Image (cartoon, rainbow, N blue to C red):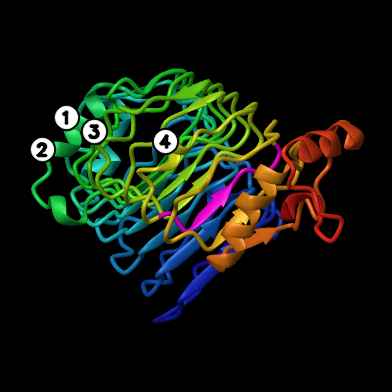
Amino acid sequence: IKPIHAWFLLLILFNSCNIIGKPYNYVNFSGLPGLEKVVLSSGGIEPIDTNVFRSHVLLRTLDLQKNSWRQLPRGLPSGLEILHLGHNRIHSLQESPLEGLKKLPFLNLLSMGSNRISSISSTFFSSLQLLKTLDLSSNHFTKVPHDLPRSLRRNRDMSQLHNLITLSGLVSVDGGLRLPNLSVCELAGNQLRILPARLTPKLEKLDCRQNNIQEVSFQQPAGMKLLKHLFLENNSIQNFEANAPTLVRLDPKGNNTDTIHERELKPLRRLQVLNLHNNKLSTLPALNLPKLKLLYLDGNPWQCSCELLEVKKDLLAQDVEIRPDFCSEPVHESLDEWRAYVLAQDIYNEEYDDCDL
């Protein structure tokens, strides 16, 4: 492509495999000094000339997703803030290909999901002092590298560091995400067997959906002093003890949970949303949750006893919204046996329904 002479261009978007018959590798942006955002996705690009973007001092966003990159690009402008490298063929983040990132002091979003990365150099983040978002999902990690938090803690500006991290392919976290200012951690779709316990105390959202977690112990979330949202959908949790008094939303739907005890939920004094959809619950204890506003109960084999209806009555009296409604009438294994029992107690009255007695 011949250089296009323009003083300013906010966005240039190329999303096909060729540009006027030529592959991306021959792109020349030298005539566009005002570029701020470039999207070169889905083009089968292999590393292009390292000088293509070097002179574009105003470039802030570069999208190179869905190409054929095998290592990180070099020669990027130092003012770059957002870099997308997902869906490429990058295998590792070691010393040799890191030179490009060492000159990006303002980078705050780095997306490298769906590559083939299995290892990270201990100095990977040493110069990325403003990094807020990191996506390493759908790579080949089996555990979080131990060097990851140490390199992050060496950064000077900790107040703005690392608000979001996404990882997948893990079978263990093992303290590898003790990042001082991490507030959102997404670990859905891994093979975790236990809930990560040694995470930052500033964590507000933990997403562990679609793992192999079988229980949540009282000690595991105890150190997360600001945790508000805990997502545990589609695990195999049978035992649950929640020591997380700051939780606002708890989502353990789609598990094998068949029993919940009152003591297990008692610490959740700020809980507003509880999602118990698609478990194996047949009854509920009294839910002494003063802030509860929304309760999901569908997809469970409820046995609509008078005790369960009393729990429902108490919830409705507290203005808790139940989705959907359940147990409109009591169901007894044998109505004759139930009436015989009531008559034996000398409290039967035909004017009352069974559960009014």
Query: Is 166 placed above or below 21 here?
Result: above
* Relative depth, front residue between 178 and 105: 178
Whether label 1 touches label 2, CB < 8 Å: yes
Residue 240 vs residue 182, the one in the foreground: 240
CA separation, marks 3 and 4? 29 Å
Q: Which residue is mark 3?
A: 178
Instruction: Give the percent coordinates (x, y) of residue 180.
Output: 19, 42
Residue designated by label 1: 150
Numbered range of the magenta stretch: 271-278
Of tags 4 and 2, the one toward the viewer is: 4
Q: Quadrant of residue 189?
A: top right
Frontmost residue, 143 versus 268: 268
Residue 192 image point, x, y percent: 48, 22
Element type where label 4 sits in the image:
helix
Disc 3 to disc 2, how far (Cα)? 13 Å
Residue type at tag 2? Arg
Q: Using a 10 Å C-alpha cutoff, classify the residue at mark 2 as few (fewer than 14 neighbours), some (14 to 19) or many (20 or more).
A: some
